[in-house]
Image (cartoon, grey):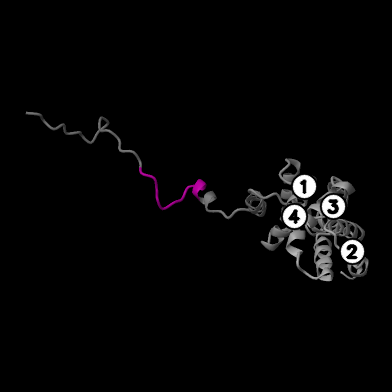
Amino acid sequence: MTRRTEWPDGPGRPERPDRPDSGAPSSSRAEQGAPPGPEEQARAICLRLLTGTPRTRKQLADALRTRGIPDDAAQEVLSRFEDVGLIDDAAFAEAWVESRHHSRGLARRALARELRTKGVDSTLIDDAVGQLDADQEERTAQELVERKLRATRGLEREKRIRRLAGMLARKGYAEGLALRVVRRALEEEGEDTELLEHHLPDL
């Protein structure tokens, strides 16, 4: 028969591990409960906004200001992000021009206007839109008119001219270029383009 060992209240008795005092939080727990500082908040906001979508420094600065981040903390974080390449307005402008020209057919003037609204520096804008030369811009304008041409068949000549030229004007193409491209496209269809000069300046 197995005897149960009775431990005496003496030195041979195993000591029970001390239980932590649940009523007194440790310093690490206190630190975990502390609210994040403004720079930490700014960093988290910027990282979230930059996930999957490049943004300019001004766009991020505006977002931080809207969320109540102090300006000095915001500028510190934004400068740090620029240093490591997470913010790059030059690369943003170049990618914007490439994408918007090929997907929307926007001309240099419209592209520059969009980049200005996003806070890109004028020098960077000039460099970015400089990727598009006059020949490329005219080729894109011609493609836009050719795609739109079929949809305008059957319309009155005056309305057709206005619709084609107005489409180019809204995309930022200069009046002279729009006039030349629309005239060429309509002449190839056998249209009388005599009225073109009279209507395009009023668009």
Q: Nearer the viewer, residue 13 or 178?
A: 178
Residue 59 appears in view: yes
Q: CA distance from mark 3 to mark 2?
A: 41 Å
Residue 115 in the image, given as x and y percentages of width and height: 80, 55
Query: What is the magenta range?
Result: 19-29
Q: Nearer the viewer, mark 4 or mark 2?
A: 2
Amino acid at dot 1: Glu
Amino acid at dot 2: Thr
Q: Residue furthest left?
A: 1
The residue where tag 2 is placed is: 193
> Overall secondary structure of the magenta stretch?
loop
Q: Nearer the viewer, mark 1 or mark 2?
A: 2
Using residue 122 as the reference point, say whether residue 150 is left or right of it: left
Q: Are marks 1 and 3 in contact (CB under 8 Å)?
A: no
Residue 133 appears in view: no
Q: CA distance from mark 1 to mark 4?
A: 10 Å
Q: Are marks 1 and 2 in contact (CB under 8 Å)?
A: no
The residue where tag 1 is placed is: 98
The residue where tag 4 is placed is: 104
